[in-house]
Image (cartoon, rainbow, N blue to C red):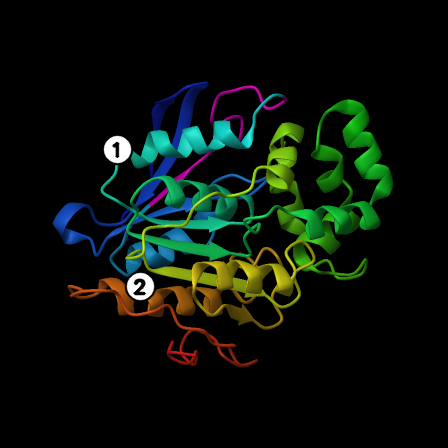
Amino acid sequence: MKSVEHSTINGKAGALGVRRQGPRGEAAKGQLLFLHGAWSSTWYWDTHFMPHFAEAGYDCIAVNLRAHGDSEGEIRFATIENYIDDVNQLVGLLDRPVLIGHSMGGFIAQHIAARQAVRGLVLLASVPHYGCWSGFLNVVRTTPSGVLRCLWTGDLTPIVTNPDAARSLMFSRGPLESDMDYMLDLYGVESIPALFGMLFKRVRGLPAASTPRLVVGADRDRLVSAADVRRTARRLGVEPVFIPNSSHMLTVDHRWRTVAAVLMEWLTVHFARPVRGEPVESAGIVVSEEGEAENTPALRRA
C-alpha cells in the first residue's frame, strides 16, 4: 500500500493541509475527495476510509479546512462560505472528483455540487440542505451549559471537551460506554459563524441531473435525524441507505466496514465501467444487522 502523501495548497486564508493516498492518473479508478465535519480534520478519513479505498484502486484525497488540523487560518471568524472556498480551491486542481462529505462536510459538498460539475456526490450523516436544526436542538438539550459557554467564549470547543456530551452526541454512547473514548482527544476547534451558516445558509440548486448521488444515514445518529436523511435523499431523487447500530461518526465506529461496502458497491455501479446515457439511479437499502463488508446486500433499485 502506498503511504499517505502530505502536502499543502495555497488557500485564501493560508496553507491548507492535504492528504493523498492511492494510485494516480490512468492507474486510478477515479478521484475521491473526502470532506470532514465540524471539530474534525483529515484524521476522520485517515483512520479507515482512505487506506481502504486506496487499496481498492481509488485516488483518495482529503483536505483540512482552514484552521483545522494542520491548515492555517483563524477559526473564530471562519464561515461556511469560507470553507466552501477552501474546497473549491482544491477541486479546481483535481479531475472532477467524487465528493464524499460527512456531516458539515456533506453540507459543504451539497453547496459545491449545486454550483459546479462533480463526478458524484456522496453524503454520509450529512447536515441537510435546510440546515442542522434538529442536531442543534439536540446539542442544546444534551449540554445546555456547554452551549452557554460556547456563546460566552465565542468558541464551540466546550461541546466536545465534555466527555459525556461528546460521547452521547458523536458516538451515541452512554456514560459507561467508553469504547470510542480514545477518539475524543482528536476533536479540535470549530467556528460559531460556521455553525450559524449550517443553520441559515440553505443549499440553493441541485447537482447536474447526470450526477450520481448516494445518501447514507446512521440509525443511532443523535445529530442528523432519520427524517433529515430522508428529506435530503428525497430532494436529490434517491432512496437513503441506513446503517444499523451506527452513530453519527459512522465511518470510524464499529460499523465502518458496512458503510465502506455500501460506498464501494455504489462506486462500482456508477464508475467501474463507461456509462452510456443517464447513470443508473442511486439505490436504497437498509443494511441488515449482520451486513458487514462481505455480507452487505448489493445496491438495487428501491
Magenta stretch encompasses residue 278? no
Image point (40%, 34%), residue name: 87
The residue drawn where x is 49% and y is 59% is 235
Locate residue 294 relative to residue 178 in the image: left or right: left
> What residue is at 66 percent from the left and 65 percent from the top?
220
Q: Main secondary structure of the magenta part?
A: loop
Q: Is residue 18 above or below residue 211?
A: above
Kind of residue sitting beneath label 2: Leu
- Residue density around tag 2, few if under 14, some if 14–19, many if 20 or more, within 10 Å: some
Q: What's the residue at 66%, 45% (across, down)?
A: 184
Judging from the image, what secondary structure is the residue with disc 2 in? helix
Identified by mark 1, the residue type is: Leu
| Front position in the image: 115 or 17 | 115
Q: Residue 74 falls in which quadrant of the image?
A: top right
Determine which residue is flagged by label 1.
93
Q: Which residues are magenta?
A: 61-76
- Badge 1 element: loop
Q: Position of residue 175 (x, y in %)?
A: 81, 57
Along the polypeptide, which appears first: circle 1 or circle 2? 1
| Residue 69 in sight in this render | no
Question: Dividing the image into 4 quarters, which one contains the C terminus?
Answer: bottom left
Residue lying at the far right in this picture: please name it.
Answer: 145
What residue would you read off at disc 2? 267
